[in-house]
Image (cartoon, grey):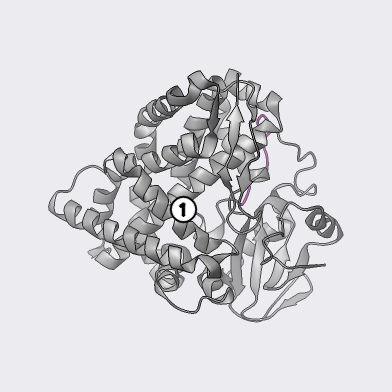
Amino acid sequence: MYFDVADPAFSVQSEAVRAARERGWYARTNYGLAVLRHREVNALLKDRRLVQGSARWPERNGVDGGPFAHWWSNTLLNLEGEDHDRIRRLLTPAFSPKLIKELTPRFQALADELVDAFAPAGRCEFIADFAEPYAARVLAIMLGIPESEWRTMSAWSGDIGLALGVTIQRDIGRVHAALAGLQGYADALIADRIQRPGDDFVSRLVLAQRDDDRLTEAELRNAIVLLIFGGMDTTRNQLGLAMRTFLAHPGQWRLLAERPELGRAAVEEVMRVNPTTTWITREAAQDIEFQGVRIAEGTTVHLFAESAGTDPDAVPDPEFDITVKRPPHFAFGGGAHYCIGHAVARGDMSVALPLLARRLPEPRLDGAPEALPMSGNTGFVSLPLAFG
């Protein structure tokens, strides 16, 4: 089986992908391989013969060099070896689950405030009215910056996110302009926290030090830009995908409203069946053989997260159900590059979803949604809803 995964019409949730998964654990693509089954995805995420493959995404899509490619290749996501381990070690304390727990009441108040603004009308454009401002203002709270600046951060993050889609070559001008804006913002924020440190996330990064080692200003800038972009993009898109998933399973939505303690389970189940990160990219660092298949050095390997998460060999009853314990999903990646911000994403979404289920009863589509391609990083541009 062969897939042209660069085609905007390609969908990781298509019947063709399901049929290919039934026949075998992989398919050929115009980049290399697509891995479709849970067991093989799990094994390859831990295989040290594969390295992070996202760094070459711009080059493989016709963008050779430039500001985004340079920044992208130097983010924690794409570093390897000692550089990766050192920066991750310095960053990790700032992502303390304790900090996220302390912020939970503020996240709850924010979610209620946003719903209050549209609840009387009985309808909303879910992305613009909730998912986007919620994701951006959560980040503002964490960073210790005025929440009123969320629109600027959101616009920059959304434009940078275009670089991870299959239309990157067409959109690279917008990507570069947004990256320049966000880097300048990060520089000003770092300079302020060096002079006036507080108890916010940026101050924790500025002060981060281990064994007389600390982050350089360039490393700080890269980390903050990645946090704003990654945190904003992931939460906004995943909330939209969660809502669309629950629209197809109204009984589960009612159950979540009745049992808010299932909020964390709801996040995990949504990310299993409908993740915003539809594939994790790796690259063969050497010629390898895996289960009888030769994978040449330099081959891109796309590990299909949703296909693995719904693989009947790993999940015999893969139907969406927030009450059932599942094998680990791969929406946050795995191995050495497991998403460092997973506690933030899990924390803010597990607050939002039960609150939305309680306050938006019987939601339904109120028009045609607009979605990004169901490949790469996906989500909704618009999702009009009516409820109650």
Quick one: 19 or 131, which is closer to the camera?
131
**Residue 34, image quadrant:** bottom right
Three-letter amino acid code at the position of disc 1? Gly
**Residue 316, image quadrant:** top right
**Membership of 353 in magenta stretch:** no
Residue 156 location in percent, x, y? Answer: 40, 55
Q: Which residues are magenta?
A: 322-330
Quick one: 173 or 269, which is closer to the camera?
173
Point out the image quarter for the C terminus. Answer: top right
Residue at 78% over, 57% down: 17
The residue to which callout 1 is attached is 158
**Residue 293, image quadrant:** bottom right
Callout 1 secondary element: helix
**Membership of 323 in magenta stretch:** yes
Residue at 49% over, 18% down: 120
Residue at 55% over, 26% down: 123
Against 364, residue 282 (above or below) is below
